[in-house]
Amino acid sequence: MGKKLPKIINKEEFEKIFAAMSKSKYKLKKQVMLAMLLGFEAGMRISEIVGLKGRYPKLQKFQVESNLIRITGKGKKDRVVPKPKRMNQTAINLLPLKIERRTLQRKITQLGRDVLGKEITFHTLRHGFGSHLAQTRPLHEVQMLMGHSRLDTTGIYLHANPLKAIEGARDVF
């Protein structure tokens, strides 16, 4: 059985939910916004940001450098991801985030429904990062930034936009 295409959001959709969150009066607004940036603009997993008991520590300030973030990802593998341009010192000072994984997941799902009218999860942000990168960067670079051990796992992002692939094929013939 083949791999299913991931659910993704594009940059415009991300900006819509990010703007909606920034206008919100939600008490954990700043933490959610930082987590959203890390998911969409750095491709981080939710567990790499807020931790997972016994498996992953929470993201800490010392891991953030001038233009990159050093993390230990899935399988205890070290990797670097780009530091989002909008991640300023005020945002860095929020680390480690004090938001529960389920709370963050629920908020992202709610934003997807309310603002975009679609079902998304936090992982959808990561898929958006991978898909966006795969349109402009070599696949081996995307693989490295996503922390995938297998290139075929990264390859799903090449197929995330079938309409674009169809148009490209029509242009060739």
Image: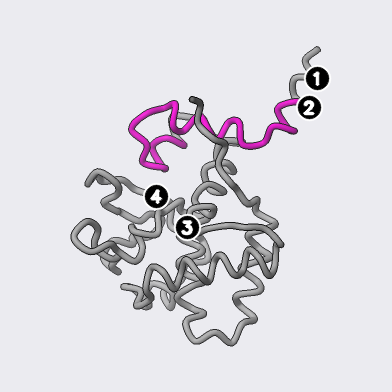
* Residue 143 picture location, percent across and down: 42, 35
Q: Are marks 1 and 2 in contact (CB under 8 Å)?
A: yes
Mark-to-mark CA distance, 1 and 4 = 35 Å
- The image quadrant that residue 65 belongs to is bottom left
- Closest to the camera, between mark 1 and mark 4, is 1
Residue at x 37% of width, y 36% of height: 148
Q: Please tell me which of labels 1 and 4 falls first in the chain.
A: 4
- Closest to the camera, between mark 2 and mark 4, is 2
Residue at x 43% of width, y 78% of height: 90
Name the kind of residue labelled 2 in the image. Glu
Task: Name the residue that disc number 3 marks.
Answer: 39
Q: Please tell me which of labels 4 and 3 falls first in the chain.
A: 3
Task: Name the residue that disc number 4 marks.
Answer: 81
* Residue 99 picture location, percent across and down: 38, 76
Magenta segment, which residues?
Answer: 142-167
Mark-to-mark CA distance, 3 and 1 = 34 Å
